[in-house]
């Protein structure tokens, strides 16, 4: 057994996977295994990975999405903790060493996460130096009153394997927000640590990021709303306030983003589905503000449409 199983799901990442893999191989802490789950790639990802066979285990499956790929990796893993890394992200050399330090300092918490930085592919890779480890420990994820969902990413998380098995891993429904659904299902797992510094991950943005898919975003939000309504998240009525505060904070951000992107129907779905929860939490500013910014957005769209019609009329088109 090793301390960490590093699980990397991959789909058509031939151009990026080596950089991701190299960031693991140069870790300061070396007690780990690397499992790469190829999710039915149709490019030459497998050929590239075979060059590193002495360092990694390669698992293959038909294309089922990242949740199913990660779950296969969990099933086949040997580590005490699971560390996730997406195939278009990178770690810093100190990432696993930071996790290892806090695992022993806090006596094996269930769930540890850290901060990351977003960088666009094509930009110069940022250079950072390791800083002093600064962290906060909570009884569980629900105990943390801060809004954390966008403070960490799947590639900056480690979770005790037995806890992951207890909650049956990731949802295998093809959607975004499957990671946030998992964090909510880990809500009462004992011991949650948020690493404030150092940064642990570089998340690269590019045209093929699945997080840019509007269909997957909508499905993911519906997954979380329905799971809460059906009582699928832990804590029962005793932790309802803590749990819904997290869910509502996540969905407030999502709804405002949808309005700004012109996805009014999706924003209104969130607003309607969570109205009572938001009201119970006293989020009056949101309940008043979202309809206002939606009306402003719709007004702007109408003006743009009328302007284009006039332009076409005067141009003779």
Image (cartoon, rainbow, N blue to C red):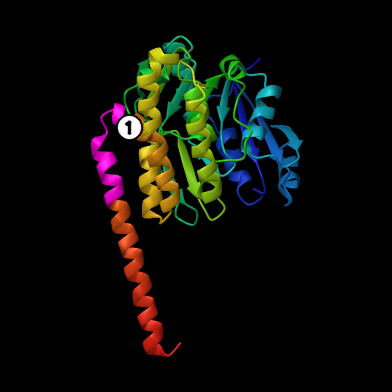
Location of residue 5 in the rendering, given as x and y in whole percent from the top left corner: 62, 24
Location of residue 181 in the rendering, given as x and y in whole percent from the top left corner: 51, 30
**Furthest residue in direction bottom, as rendered:** 316
Which residue sits at x=44%, y=50%? 265
**Furthest residue in direction top, as rendered:** 107
Location of residue 148 in the rendering, given as x and y in whole percent from the top left corner: 38, 30
Kindly indicate the quadrant of the structure image that contains residue 170.
top right
197 or 310: nearer the viewer: 310
104 or 114: nearer the viewer: 114
Rendered view: 262 above or below 28: below
Which residue sits at x=39%, y=34%? 274
Left/right of residue 190 with respect to residue 87 in the rendered view: left
Q: Secondary structure at mark 1?
A: helix
Q: Magenta residues?
A: 279-292
Left/right of residue 270 with respect to residue 22 in the rendered view: left
Rendered view: 303 above or below 177: below
Q: Which residue is mark 1?
A: 278
Q: How many marks?
A: 1
Which residue sits at x=64%, y=33%? 172
Q: Is residue 85 magenta?
A: no
52 or 281: nearer the viewer: 281
Residue 177 visible at all: no
* Overall secondary structure of the magenta section: helix
Residue 212 visible at all: yes
Left/right of residue 221 with respect to residue 267 in the rendered view: right
Q: Is residue 286 magenta?
A: yes
Kindly indicate the quadrant of the structure image that contains residue 40.
top right
Please state, as top left, top right, bottom left or bottom right, where the N terminus lies in the image.
top right
């Amino acid at each position: 057994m090793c301390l960490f199983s590093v699980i990397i799901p991959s789909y058509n990442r031939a151009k990026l996977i080596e950089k991701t893999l190299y960031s693991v191989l140069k870790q300061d802490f070396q007690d780990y295994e690397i499992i790469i789950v190829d999710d039915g790639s149709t490019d030459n990802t497998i050929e590239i990975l075979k060059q590193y066979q002495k360092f990694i285990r390669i698992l293959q499956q038909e294309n089922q999405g990242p949740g199913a790929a990660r779950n296969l990796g969990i099933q086949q893993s040997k580590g005490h903790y699971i560390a996730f890394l997406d195939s278009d992200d990178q770690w810093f050399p100190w990432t696993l060493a930071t996790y290892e330090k806090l695992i022993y300092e806090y006596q094996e918490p269930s769930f540890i996460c850290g901060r990351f930085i977003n960088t666009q592919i094509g930009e110069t890779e940022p250079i950072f130096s390791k800083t002093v480890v600064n962290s906060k420990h909570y009884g569980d994820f629900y105990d943390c009153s801060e809004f954390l969902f966008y403070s960490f990413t799947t590639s900056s998380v480690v979770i005790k394997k037995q806890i992951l098995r207890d909650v049956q891993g990731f949802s295998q429904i093809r959607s975004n927000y499957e990671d946030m659904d998992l964090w909510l299902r880990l809500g009462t797992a004992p011991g949650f640590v948020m690493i404030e510094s150092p940064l642990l991950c570089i998340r690269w943005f590019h045209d093929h990021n699945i997080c840019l898919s509007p269909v997957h975003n909508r499905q993911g939000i519906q997954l979380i709303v329905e799971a809460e309504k059906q009582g699928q998240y832990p804590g029962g009525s005793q932790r309802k306030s803590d749990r819904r505060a997290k869910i509502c904070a996540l969905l407030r951000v999502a709804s405002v983003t949808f309005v700004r992107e012109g996805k009014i129907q999706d924003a209104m779905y969130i607003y309607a589905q969570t109205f009572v929860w938001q009201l119970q939490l006293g989020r009056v500013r949101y309940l008043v503000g979202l309809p206002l910014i939606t009306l402003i957005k719709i007004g702007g769209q109408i003006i743009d449409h009328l302007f284009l019609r006039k332009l076409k009329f005067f141009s003779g088109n």
